[in-house]
Image (tube, rainbow, N blue to C red):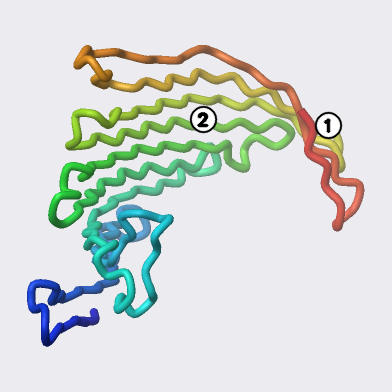
């Protein structure tokens, strides 16, 4: 944590105090399986990237706002014998701006799940991935965003140098309502299924070719 300030002898209305904080912590809630990360940051951010400000904030101090970012992230890992390994993480964070920039405040949430094949699958391998991301803004003119991705990959070790795989997936990119210049509500959403076929070829320890 650090504290800095500016004082003007002839114009006290411009006096400023700046807080800066960078902190994080983690804990093991259950041995080798359940964990928790937390963080909190306070810093100065430019309002107009074209105007800039000096590193010590003496020059261009009117072009900055204080940004507060904090959040937490519990996650869980589990090994299911030789069958599979799994990983689940939830992220929550808030971003807040001081003063008139507070209308740009946002809340973000992420959910990530992964499961990979274990050692029992000798020649074949697979993995399952799911990810959900959401960002909500206090400003009604800024579009909230959501992203949802689901993938499953199936593959085979053809030889010691060649792996082949096929990936099937569903993607959903949804944006919640946004007000246009006339105050009307609009919606946008883009989703669909997809697939890819590819593999890895590694003729030696220094060379790996990924193709799809």
Residue 211 in view (yes/no): yes
Q: Quadrant of the C terminus?
A: top right
Label 2, secondary structure: give it: strand
Q: Residue at x 11, y 78 (%)?
A: 11
Given the current orientation, which residue lies at the most extreme front position? 10
Q: Quadrant of residue 23?
A: bottom left
Residue 142 relative to residue 192: left or right? left
Q: Which mark is residue 158?
A: 1
Q: What residue does disc 2 label?
A: 128
> Is 13 or 157 nearer to us in this picture?
13
Q: Residue at x 85, y 40 (%)?
A: 201
Q: Quadrant of the N terminus?
A: bottom left
> Is 93 or 6 nearer to us in this picture?
6
Closer to the eye: label 2 or 1 = 2
- Alpha carbons under labels 2 and 1: distance apart: 21 Å
Q: Residue at x 42, y 33 (%)?
A: 131
Residue 161 relative to residue 62: left or right? right
Given the current orientation, which residue lies at the most extreme right position? 203
**For residue 60, above or below residue 111:** below
Residue 177 in view (yes/no): no
């Amino acid at each position: 944590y650090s504290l800095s300030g500016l004082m003007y002898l002839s114009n006290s209305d411009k006096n400023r105090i700046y807080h800066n904080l960078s902190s994080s912590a983690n804990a093991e809630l259950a041995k080798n399986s359940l964990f928790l990360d937390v963080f909190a940051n306070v810093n100065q951010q430019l309002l107009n990237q074209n105007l800039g400000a000096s590193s010590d904030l003496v020059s261009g101090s009117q072009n900055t706002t204080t940004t507060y970012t904090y959040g937490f992230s519990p996650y869980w890992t589990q090994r299911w014998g030789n069958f599979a390994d799994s990983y689940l993480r939830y992220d929550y964070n808030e971003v807040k701006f001081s003063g008139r920039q507070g209308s740009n405040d946002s809340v973000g949430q992420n959910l990530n799940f992964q499961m990979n094949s274990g050692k029992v699958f000798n020649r074949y391998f697979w993995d399952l991935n799911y990810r959900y991301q959401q960002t909500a803004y206090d400003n009604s003119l800024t579009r909230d965003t959501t992203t949802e991705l689901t993938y499953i990959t199936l593959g085979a070790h053809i030889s010691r140098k060649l792996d082949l795989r096929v990936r099937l997936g569903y993607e959903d990119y949804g944006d919640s309502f946004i007000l246009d210049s006339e105050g009307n509500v609009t919606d946008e959403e883009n989703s669909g299924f997809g697939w890819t076929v590819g593999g890895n070829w590694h003729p030696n320890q220094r060379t790996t070719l990924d193709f799809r």
